[in-house]
Amino acid sequence: MIDQAIFRPVVPAAAKRPRLWHWREPSILPGFPLGLGITLLYLSLIVVIPLAALAIRPWELGLSGFWRVLTDERVLRAFRLSFGLSILAALLNAPLGLLIAWSLTRYQFPGRRILDALVDLPFALPTAVAGIALTTIYAPNGPIGALAAKFGIKTAYSPLGIFIALVFIGLPFVVRAIQPVLQEVDREVEEAAQTLGASSFQKAFLVILPAIAPALLSGVSLAFARAVGEYGSVVFIAGNMPFKTEIAPLLIVIKLEQYDYAGAAAVGVGMLLISFAALIVFNAAQILLARKGRA
């Protein structure tokens, strides 16, 4: 009988020793360490360090002073106005943006490209110019403002005027978030649903809406985030009356003009915390919708 030990490979003694170091296998993503380093450096310089400075500055007032600024009635009214109208404007932009994106994606009509370009106009238009244009139209002596005044509706220099401005600047975010997803929706799935007897209502709400729901929610969150910090297009049409039409970004500017830098930073930190909490809710809902759509 042949001894199998003869055929065993001879392992060098050095190979049996545990190595203190070893070469790492090459990454499947070339340049990943360098790219990650540049990304972290950029985010640190542009995002993390400025936000850290913003968070540190209010503590010059102490905890009691910081809390006193945030609980001031004028600040609370400004927060309520800014965040409340931003949420309402984002919610209104959801069906409006979906309707516009649907029309641009599913229909061919004369002037479609012009309409598609007009959607991006609030992106390119300077906010101050947008504010002046909206004020000219919705002021009491403007064409729409004068017509609304006949019915007892005050558009400019009121919360309604702020709401209109926030809808104007937030609409493109919803349209551009939904439009590419609508273009990628499989038409065969819609045709299959129609073949199985689904009505147009069922096809829209049971087939198309679940597929675009994460993108729709993403667009709504972007519109909300833009509306919260909007200043230029709102300050002209708001009227800027304390306790009535004074938004939080304007209150920060007022405190800066009064050299109350710690107070302005305290208001900014308050806006940052509320916005961060709202975006967490939006992102969590978006993840849940995406998982539900894949299930």
Image: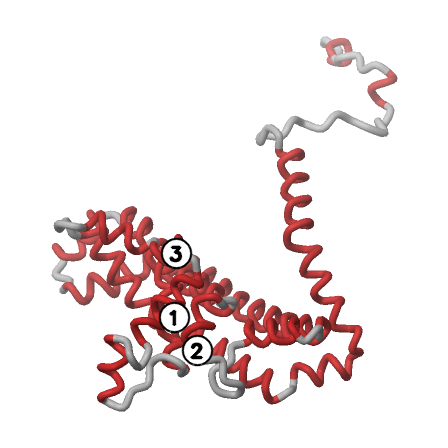
Q: Are marks 1 and 2 in contact (CB under 8 Å)?
A: yes
Residue 132 in the image: state x and y as whole percent. Answer: 38, 67
Going by the image, does 38 lie left or right of 142? right
User: Callout 3 environment at 10 Å: few (<14), some (14 to 19), or many (20+)?
Assistant: few
Q: Which mark is residue 142?
A: none
- Tag 3 or tag 1, which sits nearer the N-term? 3
Q: Secondary structure at mark 3?
A: loop
Q: Are marks 1 and 3 in contact (CB under 8 Å)?
A: no
Kind of residue at disc 2: Ala
Q: What residue sits right under mark 3 in the picture?
A: 125
Q: What residue sits right under mark 2 in the picture?
A: 238
How many angstroms separate mark 1 from mark 3 (CA)?
13 Å
Please identify, in this view, whether the residue under mark 1 or under mark 2 is nearer the observer. Answer: 2
Q: Secondary structure at mark 1?
A: helix
Q: Is residue 68 above or below residue 175?
A: below
How many angstroms separate mark 1 from mark 2 (CA)?
9 Å
Kind of residue at disc 1: Ala
User: Callout 2 environment at 10 Å: few (<14), some (14 to 19), or many (20+)?
Assistant: many
Residue 118 in the image: state x and y as whole percent. Answer: 28, 54
- Screen quadrant of the C terminus: bottom left
Please identify, in this view, whether the residue under mark 1 or under mark 3 is nearer the observer. Answer: 3
Kind of residue at disc 3: Leu
